[in-house]
Every structure is written in structure tokens, then in C-alpha cells.
Amino acid sequence: MKNTQIFKTLLIATLSTLYAVTLIAQPNKMIFVEGGTFMMGNPRTTGEYKGDTDEKPVHKVTVGTFYICENEVTVKQYKEYCTATGVKMPSEPDEEWLDSHLDTKKLYASSGKKWWGWNDLFPIHNVNWFSAVEYCNWLSHKENLEKCYTKNADGGWELDRTKNGYRLPTEAEWEFAARGGKKSMNYIFSGSNSLNEVAWYDETSLLSGPQKIKTKKPNELGIYDMSGNVWEWCSDYYKADYYSGSPEKDPFFSVSMSYRVIRGGSWHYSGDLATTTGRDGPEPAYTNFNYGFRLVRSKI
């Protein structure tokens, strides 16, 4: 009798684990985001999360309806792309990278941990903006959808949001989705005012690398990891004072600049960068072990 009960307990635990893994591994579940109007930017003027000047001024923005993936693109998904196209997988962290991130190096030396490697259920990282849009076009082609990105005569990339394929979100779409769209509760972070509930950042990751997708609480729309885990590339060029002249209706900053927008913070950054309003703008050819991306479609 006792052995039967142990067997049942083990069976239930095994099935529960398999079910959880299946849920995590579901590829490209797209969340419907009904368009709407919101106040974009950071309204706080004091405290830890008052943000930087590039998050201001707060301004009214209206975005159209779109679909956004509930999770960041995973290592497994990116591997499939590399296998199909011959593109080389991004490099993994090495001793040179550790030497330039001494806090992380000390943690690993004291913990005896190894680098995380390419775990299939981690978000892909160390991916630059160009690689992200190439992936979007590849996946669109694979699924017989229209490509959203094309190269112009100058070698730059043009985005056509009328196409039905995959793309990166605009910065306004990203923030609207992170806030919870029309279901927004106006949280500081994506899904909560408690950062630890929703984000892998330096204090919850303990600088040990990105974590499995969908292991923290989702936001109001059912989207995971929009705060923390990896920074997410957006389609827009980055301009620090863009909000001062941003149009109200469906803004997208397409004027060629030196930088592209990233959003959401990451496992290797402090919590003040994981707010729904925090923004940064590295060069599109630059990458790091906390830069990834998330898919969007204008229509399904």
C-alpha cells in the first residue's frame, strides 16, 4: 500500500513536470493586444524609479491593434534558424567577457558554477539588432507570410507594418504591451509593483545568467518577462529626446540614427532599468549576453 502511494506521488510529480515543460516550450503563442490610448513615459519625479530624462516628457500615444509573443525568442527557436540557414550561433560567455564583468566573475569563482551555455528554454541572447530582424524575415518566409523588413538602396532596413509577417515591436507598442494594454493596472514593472514577482534582474538572477522563460508572473495580458531576463530590441531608432516631438498616433521613429531602441532591462542589470518606461539605445551592430528580442505581428 505504501509503495503504491509512493508510485502515485512520483507519477503525479513527473506528469506535472512534463506539463510545465510543455507549457514553457510552446513556440510563438501570440497574445492579442487591442489598440488603445495611453500616457507614454515615466511620470515619477522622485524616488528609485524616477527614471532618466529620455523617459520624459509623459505624452499621449495611441497605438493600433497588434499581436505580441508571450515570451522572448528562445535558444531552441534560434538554433532552428541557425540550422536552417547556416547562420552561426552567437558565442557563449568566455574568460574575456568575465574579465570585463568582475562582479560576475567573482560570483562564479565563489559558487563553483559553470556558465549556463545554450539552454533551450532560455531566451536567446548575444544577438544584435540585424540578427533579430533577419530572424523575423526567415520565420515569416518559413510560415509563408509576408516579410516585414526589406533593405533599401542605401543598405538600410525598411519596416512595413502592413505586412502580416513577424517583426520587432515599435517602442510604443512595446511599452503599451508591457503596461498591460487596455487591462493596465499602471504597475511600475510589467505585471506588478513588486519587481521580484515578475523579473529576473541582478538581485534575483544573482548575476548567474538568464533564466528559463515564463517562470515569473505574467502581466495583465499574459505576457512574460517584459521586465528583466534579457533586453529586447525594438524596431525604432533611438533618440534621447524623441518624446519631446513624438507624434500621438502610432509613433515609430524611422529617421536613420546611430542607435536602436532596447527595452525591459535584463538579468545583469539593476531593477531600476526593468520598469515599463525604461529605455536605452545601443548601436544596432552591438550585442551582449543580455540582448534578445520578442516577436510581434500586425495581423494574424
Image (cartoon, helix red, strand yellow):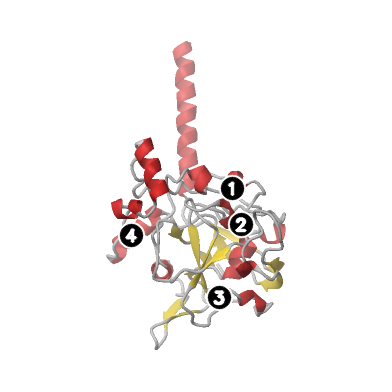
Circle nearer the viewer, 2 or 1: 2
Amino acid under label 1?
Val
Q: Quadrant of residue 263?
A: bottom right
Mark 2 secondary-structure assignment: loop
Q: Nearer the viewer, residue 144 or 32?
A: 32
Mark 1 secondary-structure assignment: helix
Task: Give me the residue at 52% from left, 49% from top.
Answer: 201
Dot 3 or dot 1: first in sequence order is 1
Characterize the local packing of mark 1: few (<14), some (14-19) or many (20 or more) Cα atoms within 10 angstroms.
many
Q: Quadrant of residue 240?
A: bottom right
Circle nearer the viewer, 4 or 3: 3
Q: Nearer the viewer, residue 100 or 147?
A: 100
Q: Nearer the viewer, residue 198 or 43?
A: 43
Tell me where residue 14 appears, x and y as whole percent.
45, 31
Question: Residue at label 1?
Answer: 198
Q: Are marks 3 and 1 in contact (CB under 8 Å)?
A: no
Mark 3 secondary-structure assignment: loop
Q: Are marks 4 and 2 in contact (CB under 8 Å)?
A: no
Task: Give me the residue at 49% from left, 59% from top.
Answer: 231
Amino acid under label 3?
Lys
Question: Residue at label 2?
Answer: 275
Q: Nearer the viewer, residue 110 or 271?
A: 110
